[in-house]
Amino acid sequence: MFELLVTASIITLLVVYAGRHFHERDDAFVLDIRGWYQAYQPATELPCPWCGAETRESDSSCPSCHRAFGVPAGR
């Protein structure tokens, strides 16, 4: 029981310290307004990795920036 209390206290202190550290540097991880929606999208509804436009599973390239999916960037 004592070990559990010590472990929980250490984890809590580390989280508080990290939160203060990131807040002071204005470097905290913050989701944008659409963040939670995007986090729970099905894997078939992923946005374009380059411009963030909505795509469909059947798309072979982005409808917005026209970059092909599955092709290395240098080609």
Image (cartoon, rainbow, N blue to C red):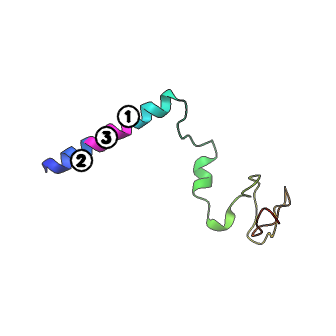
Query: Which of the 4 image quarters holds residue 6?
Result: top left
The residue sitting at 31% across, 40% down in the picture is 12
- In the rendered structure, find residue 7 and report the number of the disc placed on it: 2
* Mark with earlier residue (1, 2): 2
Magenta residues? Answer: 10-16
Q: Residue furthest bottom?
A: 58
Q: Which mark is residue 17?
A: 1
The residue identified by callout 3 is 12
Residue type marked 1: Tyr
Secondary element type, mark 1? helix
Dots 1, 2 in contact, CB < 8 A: no
- The percent coordinates of residue 64 (x first, y second) are 84, 56
Are there few (<14), some (14-19), or many (20+) residues within 10 Å of tag 1?
few
Q: Could you say which disc has been placed on residue 56 in the image?
A: none
Disc 1 from disc 2: Cα separation: 15 Å
Sequence-first tag of 1 and 3: 3
